[in-house]
Amino acid sequence: MTLTLFDAARCPYCARVRIVLAEKDVEHEVIEIDLSDRPAWLYEKNPAGRVPVLEEDGRPLPESAVIMEFLDERYPEPALLPADPADRAAVRLLVFRDDALTDPYYAFRRGEGFEDFDAALRKLDDSLAARPYLAGAEYSLADIALVPWILRARDMLAVDFEPYPALAAWVERLLDRPAVAAEAGIVAAL
Ligand SMILES: N[C@@H](CCC(=O)N[C@@H](CS)C(=O)NCC(=O)O)C(=O)O
């Protein structure tokens, strides 16, 4: 079975897939896409022309949330979705509502003020004050889905996490994992 990730280092959606592949230690090839001059053939793999695309034996799969779940099913160890359907649904809901974090992140990045991003970070901080991981006691796809924006906020937008102690502790907890630490290394090199 051959697995190819069409990737872009700066892309947080690709980061999700990179982290899942690293957690599961899956052998794969990486093709870096220059998004400012992307090849026409990318649209054959994803009509939206976006990365990530993961191709297994010539079958391209776009959309990071779908790819993450595909990888969790194809390579079940370590499991990144809980066993119980209600708990799985809770993880999926956090991923499905990722725009609660990403919309204010991009608005802040566009220079539209910090207020909404601050509110989103405070919400995450509140929720992480009650549990070690976003969906509860266990690390899951929900953490992987959101941490790419947090790492980029910290390292590329110079956001200080001191006002969000539970969020800061969660980042440190995640950085203990080699898969997330590797992604932090990619962000540091951007
Ligand atoms: N919903 C997609 C979003 C992917 C996405 O927006 N990727 C960006 C890079 S971070 C991209 O390819 N942008 C190029 C474009 O929008 O034309 C996913 O989750 O995979």
Image (cartoon, rainbow, N blue to C red):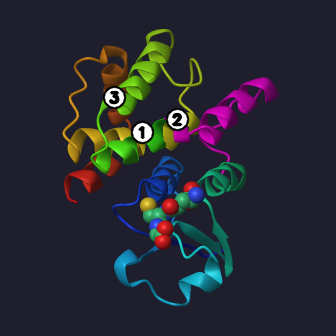
User: Where does the N terminus fall, quadrant-wise?
Assistant: bottom right
Q: Nearer the viewer, residue 134 or 26?
A: 134
Tag on residue 100?
Answer: 2
Whether pointer 3 and pointer 1 mark residues with C-beta atoms closer than 8 Å, the reply is no
Q: Residue furthest top?
A: 130
Closer-to-camera residue (139/61): 61
Which callout, 3 or 2, points to the residue nearer the camera?
Answer: 3
- The residue range painted magenta reads 75-100
Residue at the image position 40 percent from the left and 24 percent from the top: 119
Q: Which residue is mark 3?
A: 115
Label 1 sits on what residue type? Pro
Residue 16: image location, x then y, percent: 49, 51
Direction bottom: furthest residue: 40
Task: Indicate the quadrant where residue 45 lies.
Answer: bottom right
Q: Is residue 139 left or right of residue 129?
A: right
The amino acid pointed to by label 2 is Ala
Residue 153: where, in percent of width, then height? Answer: 29, 41
Q: Which residue does the numbered mark 1 point to in the structure image? A: 104
Measured as percent of width and height from the top left, residue 135 is found at 59, 24
Point 46% across, 43% down: residue: 102
Residue 112 lies in what quarter of the image? top left
Give coordinates of residue 17: x percent, y percent.
51, 56
**Is residue 90 magenta-colored?**
yes
| Secondary structure under the numbered disc 1 in the rendered image | helix
> Are discs 2 and 1 less than 8 Å apart at CB?
yes
Q: Residue at x 59, y 40 (%)?
A: 78
Can see residue 68? yes
Residue 79 in view of the camera = no
The secondary element bearing badge 2 is classed as helix
Look at the image and tell me in which quarter the C terminus lies. bottom left
